[in-house]
Image (cartoon, rainbow, N blue to C red):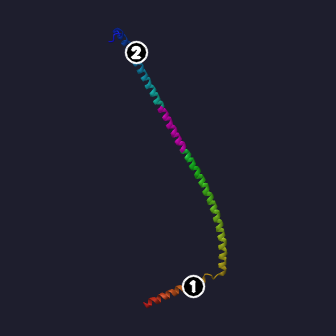
Amino acid sequence: LHSKIRADEVGEHVNDLAFEVADIDKALKKLQHKNEHDLEKVKLNLEKMLKKLEEKEDGAENRIEELEKARERSLERKLENRIETLEDQIQIKLEQRIALLETRIGVKISESASGGNGWKLPLLIVVVLVGAYMAYTARSLNKL
């Protein structure tokens, strides 16, 4: 030992230091225990927050699905209305054209009916041509 240090004082200070270290050790253990509790509380709070976020996310997904369905229904209604409008317009135009055609055909039918013999001449020409073709074919076959 050093000449200025007395053994009885060293022993006394070592004993005091041991008490101080024991007190510091107790304080550290207490602090560690408190930190563990605080971390557990933080963990539980985070889990609760995550659960709430998941619930909100599920709710948001449900709302999005509902909005998509509502949009789809709206589009279907608009398309049905548009189709009905187009069908009505087409129906009107067809009726107008049919009426015009009926008028034109009615005029032509009355013209044909007044002529009366308009179909006989074309039929006679077709019959003569078919007969001539048959005679030509028969003559060609006889030569063979």
Left/right of residue 55 with respect to residue 97 in the rendered view: left
Q: Residue at x 63, y 58 (%)?
A: 85
What residue span does the magenta drawing correspond to?
A: 46-64
Q: CB atoms at circles 1 and 2 under 8 Å apart?
A: no
- Disc 2 residue crowd, few under 14, some 14–19, many 20+, Cα 10 Å: few
**Quadrant containing the N terminus in the rendered view:** top left
Q: Residue at x 46, y 26 (%)?
A: 38
Q: Residue lying farthest left?
A: 1
Indicate the position of residue 57 as horizontal and vertical percent values.
51, 39
Residue at image mark 1? 125
- Prevailing secondary structure class for the magenta stretch in the rendered image: helix
In magenta stretch: residue 1: no
Front of the two marks 1 and 2: 2
Q: Residue at x 52, y 38 (%)?
A: 56
In magenta stretch: residue 60: yes
Residue at image mark 2? 20
Q: Residue lying farthest front?
A: 3
User: Looking at the picture, does residue 97 appear above or below residue 66?
Assistant: below
SS for dot 1 = helix
